[in-house]
C-alpha cells in the first residue's frame, strides 16, 4: 500500500488543536500559564489510531511564511529498518500533509501513521516549509520521544503510552500510591555511572542486564566476586546525562539524504550514531528522550527496562536518578532549535532564554517527559548557570524560580503520581575568581520549598585533588562546614569531575607518594581511598556518592570525539593524563590504543614525546594548526606518528586519542585487577551506612570531630557520633603523612569515648582482621571504626 493510500490527514483534529491553543493564549492568567497548558500538546502523540503533531514555530512568523508553504513531512522506510546496523542505505516514501496554525504554533493530525515500538519501527516526521525560492527547510521536533539517528534528524513517531504501560516495575510504583503525589526523599548513598564506560556493552541494555544478573546472584545467595561488590550496597544509581548530545562537527551526518529526492520518495544513507561524550554537551532538543548512542536496540524502552531492573532488585529497590542539563546548550543547538530558545553566548555555548514563556514551558515539559521513564530522583547540572539578564540592574540574575518549578513537577509512572527527589549542582558565584572561597553550596537549599533538597558539597564540587600533600588540612574549614550543615549535601571526593581534575594535576607538585609507587597507583588510591571512604561513610553527614570508574580503579578523562575546530586543543589539554593513567605496560597491551599505534605511535614513549611538544606549541602559536604542524615537522630527531604532520593529520591524531581513551576507560578493562580485600571492605562500609541512616544528619552537641595534635607530620582525623537511640560510632582515619607512634585509639582524650563496650566493626584492608583493639601504628590510608550500643 502506498503512503498516500495508508495515511490520511485529519484536518479537523489539527484545527481543534489550534483552537485549543488559541483559547489558552487568550484566557490564561499569564503567558507562561498559557504555554504550560500548550506544551503537553506539542511533540508527537499516538492514541492507537490517530497521530497528532504540535510545534512551537516563531521562526515561521519571523520569515513571514504563509500557511500554504507549511507542511507536516512523513517518511516511511520501504523495508523495515534494522537499527542495530552500522550503515545502511534506505529508500523512504514521503508525503506532505496540511497543517493548522495559530500565531507561533503549528499542528497536524493524521490516521494510518505507524508508531514505533519495541517490536517494530515507526514512521519518521518533521515540519517543513518552503521559501520564495522553492527551497525546503526542516523544523525538527525538540519534544521527540524517539530519535534513532540523533537530534539533527527527523524523529520517529513512538508509542510512548504502550512503552510505559508495559513497564515491569508497576508493582513498585503501585506500592507508593496515595491520595497525594508520593514524595521521594534522599537515598542513603549513590553510585554514579557513565553508561558508555560502565559495562563492556556500553549501553543501557547491557547495564540493565548487569543489575539483573546481580539481582539473581543475590537472590540465590551465590558468592560475590569483586565485580559484583563494586555495584552492590547502594540505595540509588545516578546516570551521567543520557540525552542526545552534539554530533560530529566536521560532518558525517547520521541521516544523510541523497541528491535527487522527490515529493514522493527520498534515499537516505543512515549511520548508527557512534559519538562519545560525557553527556553534558547537549543541544536541548530531544531532552525528553534517550541518546541513541546508548541504545543497543535503538529503542528508548531500554531506559524503562533499567528503571525496572533497579526497582525490582531483591532485598531492597534501588532508586534511579537522572542527571539533566538545562543550564546551557552547545552551539550546535542553534541548528536544532529556533533562535527564540536562546539568550546569547556563554562559556559553554548558549544561554537559554528562561524569560521566554514558551521556551520555559517547553523545557519543563521535556523534563517531565524524561523523568516519566521512571526516575525517582533528578540531579540538575550547573544550577548556577540558570540566569536571565536584568536590564534595570544591568547584570545576570539567578533564576531560582525556574529551579523551584523544576522541583515542583508532578510525574507519573505505573499509574502513580509522584514528585522525585532533587539534588542541584550549584557552586555560585562560580565562575567568579574567588568562588572556591565564596561559595556556600547552599544557595538552592535555602530557597527551595522542600526540606529534602540537596546540593553537591564542597568536597564534591569540581576542583578537589586529595593526593597533594596538605589537602586535608587546607580543606579543614570546609570539613567543619560539612559537619555543621552538610546534612543536605552530596559528599565524597570521587565523581566524574574530580577524577578528571586529578588526571590534570602537574606531577611536579608536592604529590603524596605514600599512596603508591607509580603515578597510576597514586591516582587510583587517591580516588578509591579506604580512609577517605571511611571518613565519608562513617563520620560525615549527607549522602555519599561514589563514581564507578573510581571504585573499579578504571581510567577516566574528558571524552568527546565530536570536535573538529578545537579537537587538537582539547587533546593538548588532556595530554597530561597520559602521565597519570597510562604506563608502558598498559600501552603495550594489544587491544589498547590501537588507533594511535596504527598512526605510528607504536610505544608509549612515542606518544609521550609527541605530547611533550603539542601543549606547548598550542600555547605559543595561539592554536595555529598550520604553524603547529610546521614546528612539529622540524623536531629533531623526528617525532613518531603519521610521518608528515598537517592540520588534517593532527585532527586525525586527536580523534584517535579520544576514541582510544574512551575504550581504555571502560570498567570491564580493570575487573580482573580488582583487589577483593578493597571491594569487600567498601561494600561492608556502604552496608554500615545503610544500616545507620541517622549518620546522614548534622553533628549534634554530643558529637565530636577533630584532628590529632600536634600534627607531627601527619593528618589523623577523629570522629565521635551518637545516634538517636544511644548508638555510638568512633572513627579514626589517617589521611596523609608519616606514621603515628604506637597508640591505643580508644584511650584518646575525646569526649564520649570513655568507658568499655567498644567493638571494632570496620578496619581498612591494610589492617589485619585479627586487630580488635589496643595499640596500633596508623599509616597513610588506614582507619578504624568502633561501635558501641549497636
Image (cartoon, rainbow, N blue to C red):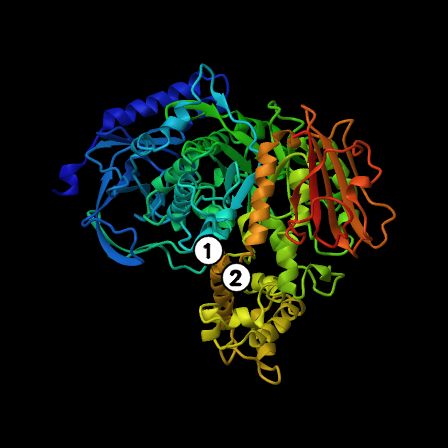
Q: Is residue 693 visible?
A: yes
80 shown above or below 368: below
Asked which quadrant contains residue 114, the reply is top left
- Residue at coordinates 38% horizontally, 30% vertically from top-left? 105
Q: Quadrant of the C terminus?
A: top right
The residue identified by callout 2 is 565
Q: Is residue 386 visible?
A: no
In this view, the residue farthest toward the left is 1
Image coordinates of residue 107 in percent, x first then y, are 32, 31
Q: Mark 1: which secondary structure?
A: loop
Q: Is residue 89 left or right of residue 649?
A: left
Foreground residue among 654 and 395:
654
Disc number for residue 276: 1
Q: Are marks 1 and 2 in contact (CB under 8 Å)?
A: no
Q: Nearer the viewer's eye, disc 1 or disc 2?
A: 1
Image coordinates of residue 229 in percent, x first then y, are 51, 47
354 shown above or below 474: above
Image coordinates of residue 494 in percent, x first then y, are 62, 48
Q: Mark 2: which secondary structure?
A: loop
- Residue at coordinates 47% horizontally, 33% vertically from top-left? 316
How dense is the environment of label 1, judged by Cα within 10 Å: few (below 14), some, or many (20 and up)? many
Amino acid at each position: 500500500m502506498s503512503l498516500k493510500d495508508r495515511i490520511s490527514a485529519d484536518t479537523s483534529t489539527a484545527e481543534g488543536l489550534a483552537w485549543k491553543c488559541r483559547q489558552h493564549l487568550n484566557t490564561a492568567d499569564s503567558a507562561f500559564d498559557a504555554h504550560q497548558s500548550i506544551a503537553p500538546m506539542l511533540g508527537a502523540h499516538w492514541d492507537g489510531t490517530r497521530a497528532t503533531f504540535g510545534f512551537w514555530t516563531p521562526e515561521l512568523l519571523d520569515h513571514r511564511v504563509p500557511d500554504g508553504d507549511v507542511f507536516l513531512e512523513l517518511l516511511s522506510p520501504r523495508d523495515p529498518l534494522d537499527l542495530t546496523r552500522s550503515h545502511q542505505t534506505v529508500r523512504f516514501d514521503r508525503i506532505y500533509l496540511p497543517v493548522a496554525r495559530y500565531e507561533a504554533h503549528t499542528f497536524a493530525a493524521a490516521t494510518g501513521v505507524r508508531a514505533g515500538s519495541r517490536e517494530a519501527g515507526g514512521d519518521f516526521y518533521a515540519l517543513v516549509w518552503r521559501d520564495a525560492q522553492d527551497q525546503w527547510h526542516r523544523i525538527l521536533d525538540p519534544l521527540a520521544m524517539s530519535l534513532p539517528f540523533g537530534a539533527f534528524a527527523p524523529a520517529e513517531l513512538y508509542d510512548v503510552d504502550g512503552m510505559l504501560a508495559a513497564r515491569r516495575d508497576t508493582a513498585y510504583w503501585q506500592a507508593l500510591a496515595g491520595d497525594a503525589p508520593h514524595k521521594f526523599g534522599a537515598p542513603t548513598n549513590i553510585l554514579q555511572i557513565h553508561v558508555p564506560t560502565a559495562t563492556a556493552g556500553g549501553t543501557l541494555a547491557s547495564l540493565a542486564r548487569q543489575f539483573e544478573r546481580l539481582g539473581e546472584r543475590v537472590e540465590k545467595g551465590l558468592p560475590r566476586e569483586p565485580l559484583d561488590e563494586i555495584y552492590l550496597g547502594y540505595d540509588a544509581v545516578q546516570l551521567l546525562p543520557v540525552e542526545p548530545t552534539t554530533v560530529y562537527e566536521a560532518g558525517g551526518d547520521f541521516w544523510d539524504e541523497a541528491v535527487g529526492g522527490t515529493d514522493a520518495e527520498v534515499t537516505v544513507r543512515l549511520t548508527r550514531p557512534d559519538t562519545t561524550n560525557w553527556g553534558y554537551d547537549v543541544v536541548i532538543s530531544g531532552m525528553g528522550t534517550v541518546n541513541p548512542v546508548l541504545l543497543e536496540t535503538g529503542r528508548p524502552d531500554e531506559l524503562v527496562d533499567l528503571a525496572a531492573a533497579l526497582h525490582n532488585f531483591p532485598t531492597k529497590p534501588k532508586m534511579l536518578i537522572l542527571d539533566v542539563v538545562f543550564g546551557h546548550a552547545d552551539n550546535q543547538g542553534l541548528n536544532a532549535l529556533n533562535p527564540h530558545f536562546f539568550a546569547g553566548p556563554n562559556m559553554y555555548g548558549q544561554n537559554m532564554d528562561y524569560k521566554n514563556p514558551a521556551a520555559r514551558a517547553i523545557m519543563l515539559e521535556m523534563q517531565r517527559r524524561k523523568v516519566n521513564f521512571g526516575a525517582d530522583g533528578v540531579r540538575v547540572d550547573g544550577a548556577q548557570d540558570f540566569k536571565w539578564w536584568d536590564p534595570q540592574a544591568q547584570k545576570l540574575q539567578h533564576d531560582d524560580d525556574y529551579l523551584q518549578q523544576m522541583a515542583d513537577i508532578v510525574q507519573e509512572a505505573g499509574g502513580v503520581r509522584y514528585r522525585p527527589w532533587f539534588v542541584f549542582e550549584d557552586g555560585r558565584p562560580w565562575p567568579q575568581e574567588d568562588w572556591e572561597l565564596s561559595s556556600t553550596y547552599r544557595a538552592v537549599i535555602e530557597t527551595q520549598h522542600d526540606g529534602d533538597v540537596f546540593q553537591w558539597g564542597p568536597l564534591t564540587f569540581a576542583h578537589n585533588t586529595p593526593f597533594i600533600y596538605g589537602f586535608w588540612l587546607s580543606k579543614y574549614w570546609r570539613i567543619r562546614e560539612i559537619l555543621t550543615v552538610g546534612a543536605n549535601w552530596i559528599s565524597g571526593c570521587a565523581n566524574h569531575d574530580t577524577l578528571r581534575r586529578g588526571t590534570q594535576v602537574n606531577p611536579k607538585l608536592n604529590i603524596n607518594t605514600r599512596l603508591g609507587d607509580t603515578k597510576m597507583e597514586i591516582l587510583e588510591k587517591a580516588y578509591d581511598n579506604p580512609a577517605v571512604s571511611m571518613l565519608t561513610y562513617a563520620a560525615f553527614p549527607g549522602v555519599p556518592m561514589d563514581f564507578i570508574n573510581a571504585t573499579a580503579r578504571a581510567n577516566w578523562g574528558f571524552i568527546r570525539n565530536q570536535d573538529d575546530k578545537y579537537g587538537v586543543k582539547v587533546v593538548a589539554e588532556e595530554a597530561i593524563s597520559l602521565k597519570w593513567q597510562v604506563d608502558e605496560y598498559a600501552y603495550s597491551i594489544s587491544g589498547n590504543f590501537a588507533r594511535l599505534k596504527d598512526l605510528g605511535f607504536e610505544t608509549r614513549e612515542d606518544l609521550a614525546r609527541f605530547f611533550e611538544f603539542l601543549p606547548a606549541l598550542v600555547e605559543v602559536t595561539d592554536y595555529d594548526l598550520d604553524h603547529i604542524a610546521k614546528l612539529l615537522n622540524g623536531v629533531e630527531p623526528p617525532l613518531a606518528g603519521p610521518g608528515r604532520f598537517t592540520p588534517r593529520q593532527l585532527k586525525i591524531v586527536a580523534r584517535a586519542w579520544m576514541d582510544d581513551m574512551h575504550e581504555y576507560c571502560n570498567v570491564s578493562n580493570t575487573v580482573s585487577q580488582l583487589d577483593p580485600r578493597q571491594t569487600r571492605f567498601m561494600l561492608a562500609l556502604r552496608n554500615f551506612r545503610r544500616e545507620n541512616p541517622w549518620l546522614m544528619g548534622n553533628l549534634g552537641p554530643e558529637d565530636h570531630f577533630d584532628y590529632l595534635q600536634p600534627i607531627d607530620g601527619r593528618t589523623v582525623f577523629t570522629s565521635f557520633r551518637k545516634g538517636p537511640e544511644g548508638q555510638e560510632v568512633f572513627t579514626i582515619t589517617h589521611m596523609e603523612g608519616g606514621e603515628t607512634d604506637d597508640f591505643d585509639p580508644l584511650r584518646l582524650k575525646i569526649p564520649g569515648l570513655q568507658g568499655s563496650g567498644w567493638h571494632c566493626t570496620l578496619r581498612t584492608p591494610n589492617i589485619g582482621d585479627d586487630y580488635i583493639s589496643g595499640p596500633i601504628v596508623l599509616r597513610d590510608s588506614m582507619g578504624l571504626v568502633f561501635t558501641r550500643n549497636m
